[in-house]
Amino acid sequence: MIDKIIRFRRVASTQDTAKRFVQEGHELAVTSLSQQRGRGRQGRTWYSPHGGLYVSLLLFPKERLTSIPLLASLSVIRTLEGLGFSKLVIHWPNDVLLDSRKVCGVVCERYQNAMICGIGLNVNIDRFGQRAVNATSLSVEAGREFDIDEVLNQLLVQFNSLYEELQERGLKVKEVLNYISGLGEAVEVLTKKGKISGTVYDIDDDWALLLRDENGMIRKLYYGDVRRLEW
Ligand code: BTN
């Protein structure tokens, strides 16, 4: 459970700053007002000016590691619903879309005996230009600014409650199915081992994506970039 927040004004990446606290063996959050080298999944950069929420959760989960990215996305969804937003979707495994545009990204990395789960949420960012195509923010969508600290507090409340449930009983997948985009759709998933095409069949109990491939085989994927195929 996260019960401590360590705050910075500017860091290269909260993912790296969080590593400094691994030896303490305590679950905590590292946040910064901006990042100079915010990073996303698959070597991408994460646009990190003032106005965004950048947080890395340093976790020592006992089991069910693979569920953490979706757990983070679901915490974001619950937080944004609490702020009055709707039209929220999880683009498996870890993007949160608001009205079809990306408002949040999650990247999880293992480091020693820890898992560092980084969440970037576009809160009060008014312009993205070419730096983040198809991105949006809470302020753009709502036409007003939000208190970033308050959003972070809500996010941690939601995360802690889901995290506790996950560790004790395993999470019920049902809620997340309400938000997953692409069920039943033809997609192409780019993994480290190559591309897999198929139809999204289901989300498994450990929150892996189940895909029916061209040969009718069910493939289980824990990570990858999902792209919808237009036939
Ligand atoms: C993605 O969509 O590719 C994931 C983006 C994750 C960005 C967050 S911001 C806080 C943490 N620090 C980083 O450098 N990255 C993550």
Image: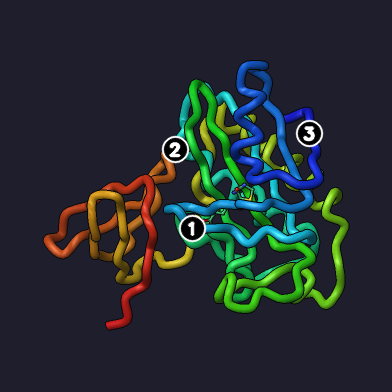
Q: Residue at x 85, y 49 (%)?
A: 149
Residue sitting farthest toward the bottom: 231
Between the C-alphas of marks 3 and 1, the distance is 25 Å
Q: Residue at x 57, y 35 (%)?
A: 116
Three-letter code for the amino acid on which mark 3 is drawn: Ile
In this picture, residue 62 sits left or right of residue 201: right
Q: Image height check: is 112 above or below 77?
A: above
Residue 81 seen in render: no
Quadrant location, the C terminus? bottom left
Three-letter code for the amino acid on which mark 1 is drawn: Arg
Q: Residue at x 66, y 24 (%)?
A: 21
In this picture, residue 143 sits left or right of residue 215: right
Whichever of labels 2 and 1 marks the residue nearer the N terminus, that label is 1
Residue assigned mark 3? 6
Q: Image height check: is 119 above or below 140?
A: above
Question: Where residue 44 is drawn, which disc sits there?
Answer: 1
Q: Are marks 2 and 1 in contact (CB under 8 Å)?
A: no
Q: How is the image coloured?
A: rainbow
Residue assigned mark 2? 66
Whichever of labels 3 and 1 marks the residue nearer the N terminus, that label is 3
Q: Image height check: is 161 above or below 227?
A: above
Q: Is mark 1 within 8 Å of ligand 1?
A: yes
Which of the two residues, 129 or 157, is positioned nearer the viewer here?
129
Between the C-alphas of marks 2 and 3, the distance is 25 Å
Q: Find numbered disc 1 in the image and state the secondary structure of the residue it sits on.
A: loop
Residue 58, percent across and down? 63, 31
Between the C-alphas of marks 2 and 1, the distance is 21 Å
Quadrant location, the N terminus? top right
Question: Where residue 31 is drawn, which disc sits there?
Answer: none
